[in-house]
Image (cartoon, rainbow, N blue to C red):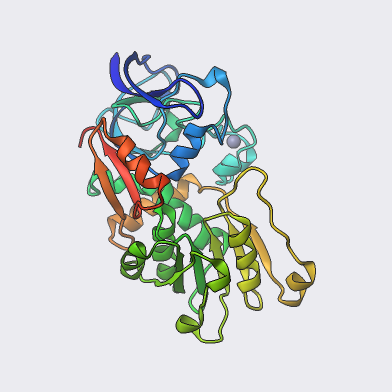
Amino acid sequence: MRVEGYRLHRWGGELVWETFELPDPGPEEALIQVEACGIGLTVLNCIRGDLADERAALPRVPGHEIVGRVVAVGNGVTGLTPGQRVMVYFYLSCGTCLACRSGRDSLCRNLAGWVGVHRDGGYAPYAVLPARNLLPLPESIPAAQATAIPDAIATPLHVCKTRAQIRPGDRVVVIGAGGGVGIHMVQMARLFGAEVVGLEAYEEKFDLIREAGGIPVLSRDFAQVDLRPAWGEERPTVVIDLVGTPASLTWAMNALGPGGRMVVLTTFREVTFPADPRQMVFRELTLLGSRYASKAELIEAAELVARGMIRPVVTQVVPPGEVETVHQALRSGTLKGRGAVVWSA
Ligand SMILES: [Zn+2]
């Protein structure tokens, strides 16, 4: 079938709005009609070629936070029927290696890349994807809101539940709390029983952080960050860094109290930070990397939204043809929470 959508012809280049041919779904694949696709910093990183930049993967339809409906399935697909509502798992995991079979899909040993990088994604009205990447999505959640689930909400669930194991009594700092993952991280850490401070460089996002249950603190300059109005002399037990600069990483490690855990999610090539073994031993610190989420966590994240326990924060919803306005807001750091493009809903 012929579709009209956005494609990338050069990593780091401009998106091109064009008509192109979509293949029929092959074995183990399904064709979905895209209801909506989330727009966040990770999509910009994908477009820039940060995750992978092989020329062979071009042209490419970006966008991985996809919700939609199954239209047709290829040979050998079971468990999916036309009309079924689905959300898309970001990683092109194999489904058969030990990591996949033990429910740690994001650590797949045979990872074939990412949706929107190595397979066409949700910046077009239809997509053909591996059937194993399609997970059930409840009917009750509106499309634009639902785009936050497969990454912006599932990733915080993985951090709070599986990695940092947050529990009542924890004092959690989220660095970059007003962004798409950050604002849901604040909500999730609250849901797991923690007190939460949200560090944010833009005061316009403070109300959003309060609504999510966090205490906003300005972090334009990390040397000036002051947690005392929130917690007095008590130090955080968990710091979750979504900014990934030498300044934010160094602040995170220094800020932690005894027994503290630091969670790292955002990385940039060649950005490192000094870790002081003496401080790590004296305070018995734990440094945790966290990589996306499992398929089970995506399904659980959808359940939390369906039950009203996590509220998707998708503040800028645009029709096809206007994704660049959301990209601009992301680049300038002014987008509150997530954006989304709605194709059909
Ligand atoms: Zn695997």
Q: Position of residue 172 (x, y in %)?
A: 51, 71
Quadrant of the image for the C terminus? top left
Task: In the displayed orientation, state which residue is furthest to the right.
Answer: 278
Quadrant position of ligand 1: top right
Does the image show residue 192? no
Q: In the shown orientation, is residue 153 left or right of residue 321?
A: right
Q: In the shown orientation, is residue 115 left or right of residue 307?
A: right
Q: Quadrant of residue 81?
A: top left
Q: Position of residue 169 (x, y in %)?
A: 50, 79
Does the image show residue 34? yes
Q: Is residue 270 above or below residue 303?
A: above
Tell me which residue sits at (45%, 81%) in the image: 230
Report the number of discs.
Answer: 0
Tell me which residue sits at (71%, 76%) in the image: 283
Q: In the shown orientation, is residue 275 left or right of residue 187?
A: right
Q: Quadrant of residue 183?
A: bottom left
Q: Position of residue 161 (x, y in %)?
A: 51, 61
Tell me which residue sits at (43%, 47%) in the image: 151
Which residue is at the front of the view, 222 or 37? 222
Which residue is at the front of the view, 53 or 301? 53
Q: Is residue 5 above or below residue 209?
A: above
